[in-house]
Image (spheres, grey):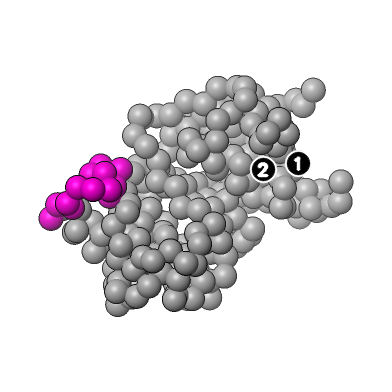
Amino acid sequence: MFKKPPQGPGNERDTTAHLSFTDLCAGYDGRPVLRQLSADIPALATTALVGPNGSGKSTLLGVLAGVIRPTSGTLSRRDGSAPAFVPQRAAVPDALPLTVRQTVEMGRWGERGPWRRLTRRDHALVDEALDRLGIGALAGRQLGALSGGQRQRALMAQGLAQGSALLLLDEPTTGLDPEARDRIAGLLGELVTDGVTVVQATHDLTAARASDACLLLRDGRLVGQGRPERVLTATALAEVWQPM
């Protein structure tokens, strides 16, 4: 049986958590992916989920978003509001006949529903999200006509438009140029200041090291948690990425 990571350097648990989970297990069609994970996601902070492909990052993010049901364990939230979940851009078909603005407006459907007219406040939130991601000039463009980085920013703007206190991001900087990555990093810091808790699954160690907290996963198991400088050591990363 997998044992919980011990308390101590690289394995701290936060007492003021937005999310907490204990002995969390999840998978697909009877195939286990997450194996007895216990950790806290600190409130009003950025947390990076780090690990190689197949380590369980996206599955854990899906559980936190409520789109994947855990098979066992407990998950508790600080509040009952729905999180905003931004998937990888590869998960969104190129052929969707939507403009960038329509894509971002979908972020308001949680409150309005898809068939109700958006209010003035809804439009203001959409405009703000477009501006914060630097894609206001692309609002009339078709989503499928954008570059990969532009489309990722459109999906992030949709997440911002939801106005949730919890923003979950799956590989938000993949395929972005350095300027766009810096814009995203700055934006995430602003959101935390504004009262948002941010969790991102990422392969980008630069982004992970800039986060406030980090969960390090391997083969569906949690092997470290705490401040990035204490978790993402050369030794720990070498062990995590070595062949099974």
> Which SS class for mark 2?
loop
Where is residue 162? Give x, y as percent.
31, 49
- Return the x and y of residue 112 as percentages of the image width and height: 23, 44
Distance of label 2 from label 1 (alpha carbons): 7 Å
Q: Residues within 10 Å of mark 1 (few under 14, many from 20)?
A: some
Q: On the image, numbered disc 2 is attached to which residue? A: 56
Asked if one can make out residue 172 in the rendered structure from this viewpoint, the answer is: no
Q: Is residue 121 left or right of residue 56?
A: left
Q: Where's the N terminus, which quadrant? A: top right
Q: Is residue 27 left or right of residue 116?
A: right
**Vertical position of residue 115 compared to residue 28: above or below:** below
Of all residues, the one furthest to the left in this rendering is 120
The amino acid beneath tag 2 is: Gly
Q: Position of residue 134 (x, y in %)?
A: 34, 72
Q: In the rendered image of this protein, does residue 32 appear above or below residue 94? A: above
Q: Which residue does the image show at 53% across and 75% down from the upper left?
A: 177
**Residue type at the position of mark 1:** Asp
Say if residue 166 shows up in the picture: yes
Residue 73 got which mark? none
Element at label 1: loop
Q: Position of residue 172 (x, y in %)?
A: 51, 60
Query: Which residue is drawn at the image coordinates 38% and 66% (left, top)?
Result: 97
Where 225 falls versus 242 (above or below)?
Answer: above
Magenta stretch contains residue 236: no
Q: Is residue 79 left or right of residue 125?
A: right
Which residue sits at x=36%, y=46%?
196
- Is 149 situated above or below 106? below
Any magenta on residue 113?
yes
- Which region of the structure is painted magenta? 108-120
At label 2, counting other C-alpha atoms closer than 10 Å, the crowd grade (few under 14, some 14-19, many 20 or more) is: many
Residue corresponding to mark 1:
219
**Do the residues under discs 2 and 1 have CB atoms within 8 angstroms?**
yes
